Image (cartoon, rainbow, N blue to C red):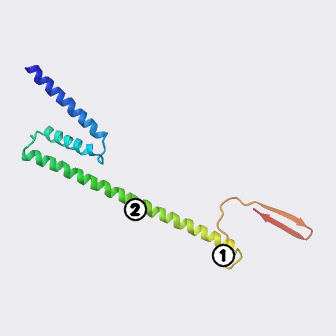
Amino acid sequence: MKRNIVVIIVLSCVATNVRLAAARDCPLPYPCAYEIQAMNDDATCKSYGFRAGTDAFAECRMKLAQQRQSQDAAALAERERVAAEQERKDAQEQARTDAQINAIGRWLANPRSAGSTAPAYSGPTYCRTTRFGNMTDTNCY
């Protein structure tokens, strides 16, 4: 008789560990995840010494659910903050790019107009000078 009890306890522990392991592989949007999460919460509350069906057990389950909701809300807020920050950076980069393209377009349209300067070019400049009698021709590229 004692051997049967020990075998049942061991099998119960193995089954609980299998269910807990399965929970890690089944994300929450899937129906099985809620059942597995409930089993995990039951196992957690039982590990604290609460017995199923008691008010303390129900309170334990409720606190676990509230903690999970709080963590989910904080994670969502963080994702939204990061997304908003990325949108702001993208908008700034787009504005800089648009300004550069507009400056180049204005200069190409009328390079000699007053106040119009060539867009900044940071690369090297090479010049070649050729003399023809009294004249000097300089070409830079």
The residue nearer to you, when weighing 127 against 81, is: 81
**What's the amino acid at mark 1?**
Ser
Up the image or down, 43 lies above or below 127; here it is: above
Quadrant showing the N terminus: top left
Give the x, y percent position of residue 37. 23, 43
Checking the image for residue 94, the label placed there is: none
Checking the image for residue 84, the label placed there is: 2
Up the image or down, 124 lies above or below 36; here it is: below
Q: Determine the residue located farthest toward the right in the rendered image.
A: 133
117 to the left or right of 141? left
Mark 1 is surrounded, within 10 Å at the Cα level, by few (under 14), some (14 to 19) or many (20 or more) other residues, namely some
Checking the image for residue 116, the label placed there is: 1
Q: Determine the residue located farthest toward the front in the rendered image.
A: 31
Query: Could you tell me which residue is drawn at 24 percent across and 36 percent down?
Result: 19
**What's the amino acid at mark 2?**
Ala
Up the image or down, 89 lies above or below 45; here it is: below
Give the x, y percent position of residue 113. 69, 78
Label 2 secondary element: helix
Query: Could you tell me which residue is drawn at 11 percent across and 44 percent down?
Result: 57
